Image (cartoon, rainbow, N blue to C red):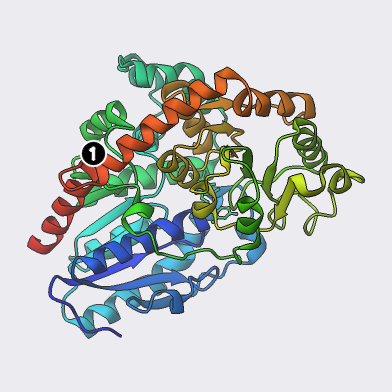
Amino acid sequence: MEKQRKSGHLVLVTVPFQGHITPMLQLATILHSKGFSITIIHTELNSPNPSNHPEITFVSIPDKLTKSQLSDTDVAGLTLILNKNCAAPLQKCIKKLLHSYGHIAAVLYDTLMYCAQTIADNLRLPGITLRTCSATTLLFFPVFSQLDEKDFISGIESPELRVLQLQRFRALLSQNPTEATMETRVAFTNVVRSSSAIIVNSMEFLEQEALSKVKKYFPAPIFTIGPLHKLAPTVCSSLLNEDEKCILWLDKQSPESVIYVSFGSIASMDRQELVETAWGLANSKQPFLWVVRPGLARGSEWDESLPNGFRESVGERGCIVKWAPQKQVLAHVSVGGFWSHGGWNSTIESICEGVPMICKPFFGDQHVNSSYICRVWNIGLELHELERGNIEKTIKRLMVDMEGNEIRKRAMDLKEKAALSLMEGGSSSSSLYDLTNQISSA
Ligand code: UDX
């Protein structure tokens, strides 16, 4: 256990999903660099590798979850179980840390682990929530819990939100929410309302309108500090082994010729969709790097569902891996496009490298992110149906046609703006400064 450092001791609480562990580890590294000592409390399942982060103390709590539960896309149901199973061990663990350190400056927790706010309140500690998805998704909490669609939508005047509203909000709101979904929405709204600060892994310029609306809904100060991966570039957080061989393959390709394809750590498709994806990539005639994660095709171990003759047909033009060093891939000069599920981390990683996208959202916030990418920022193309002809056409539009050039220019423009927000005096670095001041002065 590291001794308490000059700025104080912080307890960070994470949840067992790749897309959430990564930003929490990045935040931990950043706050450590600002003089805080850090303990990360994590679940036994999907625990981060402590040897990659010698500066951080790791403590695990029992979660009573199984690996197969984690691949379920019913995130709401899983969130309820997680909070139910972890509340008591988490309370015990934080109490013990408080006893050892004598003082804890704040408890920072992933919004999905909302039970941490109640524990912080009980122990009279400031609770700060980290929203690892976009700021816009915070708007859903009050809306969803009240289901006051008319009032919400009529209040939206800005072009940014109007685009989202028309295309996606209605569809999302009208889906029949399960009881678990309703319960988590209420829990999220309540914790975000009672936290002493909200951290969002985003950038002011990306979600300006949404952020100003979020500020009206929630009393706590909002710190938009992102992209965290650029503030903590060396953090290694992959739960699967990154296959470095794909970088050697990328080295042999022409500049901006490769379409990188990855659907994150949770999304899955049926076998026929995998077959269509494979032939769409083959028929596009474009070099591709495809992450076929174990379990990506439901019911398959790994690549046994790829169609006969596919590998022979693409030969050296295609590279398939189980897991890639994604940030390195996106920064590679050979990569000219990213076909993504629209997960928030993938979205901001792509923006930071100026890589235009194709979006095939699968569930939840991925629909909203895809709307932003394709309709608000105009740096990508939407792909709805996983059908080979459709895939081939969309890849060509992005990678070959003039339309793709225009999209690429806009993506490069966002890359520059992202870099500016990280510079001294930029919105993200100022927000980080304000956050550390608030924590230290509490
Ligand atoms: C989940 C949700 O699915 C998503 O909707 C939400 O926005 C965040 O939490 P996930 O699906 O895993 O996340 O997607 P994403 O947010 O994009 O995170 C994936 C992370 O894994 C990224 O940081 C990406 O760089 C990394 N990754 C992905 C790799 O390092 N290698 C890979 O091969 C694929």
Q: Which residue is mark 1?
A: 218
Query: Where's the N terminus, which quadrant?
Result: bottom left
Left or right: residue 81 versus residue 119 is right
User: Vertical placement of 308 versus 400: above or below?
Assistant: below
Q: Residues within 10 Å of mark 1 (few under 14, many from 20)?
A: many
Instruction: Pick whichever, 40 or 118, lies toward us.
Output: 40
User: Vertical placement of 202 versus 248: above or below?
Assistant: above
Left or right: residue 310 versus residue 199 is right
Residue depicted at 52% across the width and 45% down the height: 333
Instruction: Pick whichever, 170 or 387, lies toward us.
Output: 387
Residue depicted at 37% across the width and 79% down the height: 54
Instruction: Pick whichever, 342 or 252, lies toward us.
Output: 252
Measured as percent of width and height from the top left, residue 164 is found at: 44, 22
Residue depicted at 34% across the width and 59% down the height: 232
Numbered label tally: 1
Residue type (three-letter) at the residue carrying disc 1: Phe
Q: Secondary structure at mark 1?
A: loop
Measured as percent of width and height from the top left, residue 323 is found at: 63, 58
